[in-house]
Image (cartoon, rainbow, N blue to C red):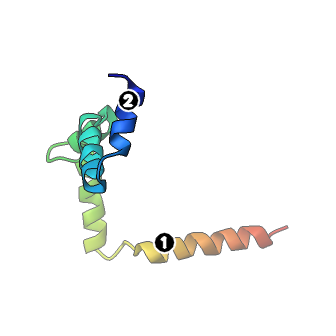
Amino acid sequence: MTVDAIKEAIAELPEDERHSLAAWLNEIEYDDWDKQMVKDFSPGGRGMAWVEKVKREIAEGKATSLEEGLAAVRAERERSKSRP
């Protein structure tokens, strides 16, 4: 079977079956970067120290919400534009 024949067959599938196929293809194409991220942010992974630091900062009230952070970035951009 050729790739073109497969594409034609996929195009004829009902929408729910195409979604199922896409999910399956995504699963088998689960790339190395994704696998590494899962490994890094699983218990004992090298990213967990960062996660714990962020959790501490949140608990200590040192973190801001995403909305506040984005607003601060936008304000800084506006200030930068107005500078000569």
Could you say which is closer to the camera, residue 42 or residue 8?
8
Could you say which is closer to the camera, residue 71 or residue 29?
29
Could you say which is closer to the camera, residue 20 or residue 42?
20
Q: Please, what is the three-letter code of the amino acid marked with disc 1?
A: Gly
Dot 1 corresponds to which residue? 69
The quarter of the rendered structure image containing the N terminus is top left
Most extreme residue toward the top is 1
The residue at the point 48 percent across, 72 percent down is 69
The residue at the point 39 percent across, 37 percent down is 8
Q: Please, what is the three-letter code of the amino acid marked with disc 2?
A: Ala
* Picture coordinates of residue 65, whole percent (x, y): 40, 75
The residue at the point 73 percent across, 67 percent down is 80
Q: How far is mark 1 from mark 2, CA to CA?
A: 50 Å
Relative to 73, residue 43 above or below: above
Position of 65 with respect to 71 (left or right) is: left
Q: Which secondary structure, mark 2?
A: helix
Q: Which mark is residue 5?
A: 2
Q: Which secondary structure, mark 1?
A: helix
**CB under 8 Å between discs 1 and 2:** no
* Picture coordinates of residue 57, whole percent (x, y): 31, 67
Position of 37 with respect to 8 (left or right) is: left
Confirm whether residue 7 shows in the render.
yes
Q: How many marks?
A: 2
Quarter of the image where one finds residue 84: bottom right
The residue at the point 29 percent across, 71 percent down is 58
Position of 44 with respect to 16 (left or right) is: left
